[in-house]
Image (tube, rainbow, N blue to C red):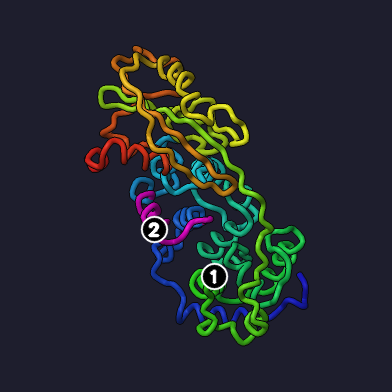
């Protein structure tokens, strides 16, 4: 810990502000149950509060305890997560619940050093769970906190680079208050989420304005330093929408990779880089995709559907969907990972958000409310 970073006035100002002006009515703030706190922290990773709340509430309705979550099937967990994105979180969530049952008899440990050894829990999340559940004095350093620190202390360099991040961790540890860790931790999160926002910081209402280097220098738009941009990669995929007798054919995706563990539509040769010219011309793709469809039944009609794109963190996916109406389907699907799913039940299927949106527009909203 660097003694030059110790600043009791900073933490005291954050605690005072949070108690008076911070957020106090979020669903997960009404409990010290480590399971519920952990669930909220995992969901809030890279996701806005407004989007998380309904998922959090539905999860707790179906899995009110860590034992319930650990005993659920993978399909049940993924179905509840469908649409929230970053699906590795859901897989790790399930594994973590199972390990908490196996290693700790269903009680999350209060030591961040033990929490961080569980699947899907990083250093900052471990500190937040320990602080909010047990009052453990531990430092967080999520994106909001990095932004607050970068502006208030005038930190140069991209916060995601290792030298800058290491220095930020030293500062985060040095700034911890002796008392009021819960209010301090929540206050840092609240400041970054409500006042010290990325594009339109509300400096006039900020309790740290008088000590903020970025405000004094007119550099709130420059700090924190943004990540160096790389050209966005693009991938493409041809997806098959195969329909028969009120059912649609879905495919179980591998656990790893994009949409891991979810059901999705079958694809022709998977996702490929756009630079790969195979299949970029729709008319050229029809023979191959038709042969693939014929493995599942007799094709009665083919229709090209409007293409769409979906942006991931690291690339953009361009999808060309092709609809096949089957006159008769083969009695058995060739591979175990394929399943004919009733259209009436597809609203509850663990589908990626763009695939669910496509099927919703194609099959009609009446099926989704049934």
Say if mark 2 contacts mark 1, CB within 8 Å: no
Q: Position of residue 61 (x, y in %)?
A: 33, 49
* Quadrant position of the C terminus in the picture: top left
Q: Position of residue 189 (x, y in %)?
A: 53, 68
Q: Nearer the viewer, residue 331 or 290?
A: 290
Please name whichever residue, 17 or 278, is drawn nearer the observer in this view of the structure: 278
Residue at image point 74% right, 64% down: 164
Identity of the residue drawn at 69% across and 77% down: 153
Secondary structure category for the residue under label 1: loop
- Which numbered disc covers residue 352? none
- Residue furthest top as drawn: 331
Bounds of the magenta segment: 45-59
Residue that mark 1 sits on: 199
Name the residue located 29 percent from the left edge and 34 percent from the top edge.
345
Residue at image position (65%, 69%) is 224
Name the residue beneath numbered marker 2: 53
Would you identify the image quadrant in which residue 135 lies?
A: bottom right
Q: Is residue 3 magenta?
A: no
Residue situated in front as seen by the camera: 97 or 23: 23
Q: Where residue 220 appears, x then y in whole percent?
A: 62, 76
> Mark 1, residues whose alpha carbon is within 10 Å: few (<14), some, or many (≥20)?
few
Residue 356: percent from the left, percent from the top? 37, 40
């Amino acid at each position: 810990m660097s003694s030059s970073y110790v600043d009791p006035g900073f933490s005291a100002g954050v605690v005072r502000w949070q108690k008076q002006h911070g957020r106090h009515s979020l669903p997960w703030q009404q409990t010290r149950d480590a399971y519920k706190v952990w669930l909220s922290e995992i969901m809030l990773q890279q996701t806005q509060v407004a989007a998380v709340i309904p998922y959090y509430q539905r999860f707790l309705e179906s899995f009110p305890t860590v034992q319930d979550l650990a005993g659920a099937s993978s399909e049940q967990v993924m179905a509840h997560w469908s649409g929230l994105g970053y699906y590795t979180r859901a897989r790790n969530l399930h594994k973590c619940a199972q390990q908490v049952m196996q290693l700790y008899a269903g009680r999350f440990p209060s030591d961040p050093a033990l929490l961080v050894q569980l699947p899907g829990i990083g250093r900052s999340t471990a500190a937040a769970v320990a602080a909010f559940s047990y009052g453990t004095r531990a430092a967080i350093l999520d994106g909001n906190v990095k932004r607050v620190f970068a502006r208030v202390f005038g930190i140069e360099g991209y916060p995601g680079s290792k030298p800058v991040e290491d220095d930020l961790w030293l500062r985060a540890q040095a700034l911890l208050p002796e008392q009021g860790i819960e209010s301090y931790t929540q206050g840092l999160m609240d400041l970054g989420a409500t006042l010290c926002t990325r594009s339109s910081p509300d400096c006039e209402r900020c309790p740290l304005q008088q000590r903020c280097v970025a405000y004094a220098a007119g550099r709130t738009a420059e700090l924190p330093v943004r990540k160096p941009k790389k050209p966005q990669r693009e991938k493409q995929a041809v997806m098959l929408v195969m329909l028969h007798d009120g059912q649609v054919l879905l495919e179980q995706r591998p656990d790893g990779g994009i949409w891991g563990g979810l059901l999705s539509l079958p694809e022709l040769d998977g996702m490929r880089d756009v630079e790969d010219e195979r299949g970029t011309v729709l008319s050229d793709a029809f023979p191959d995709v038709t042969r693939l469809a014929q493995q599942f039944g007799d094709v009665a009609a083919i229709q090209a559907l409007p293409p769409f794109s979906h942006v991931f963190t690291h690339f953009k996916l361009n999808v060309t969907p092709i609809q096949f109406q089957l006159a008769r389907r083969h009695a058995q699907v060739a591979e175990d990972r394929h399943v004919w799913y009733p259209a009436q039940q597809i609203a509850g299927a663990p589908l990626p958000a763009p695939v669910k949106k496509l099927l919703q527009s194609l099959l009609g909203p009446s099926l989704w409310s049934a």
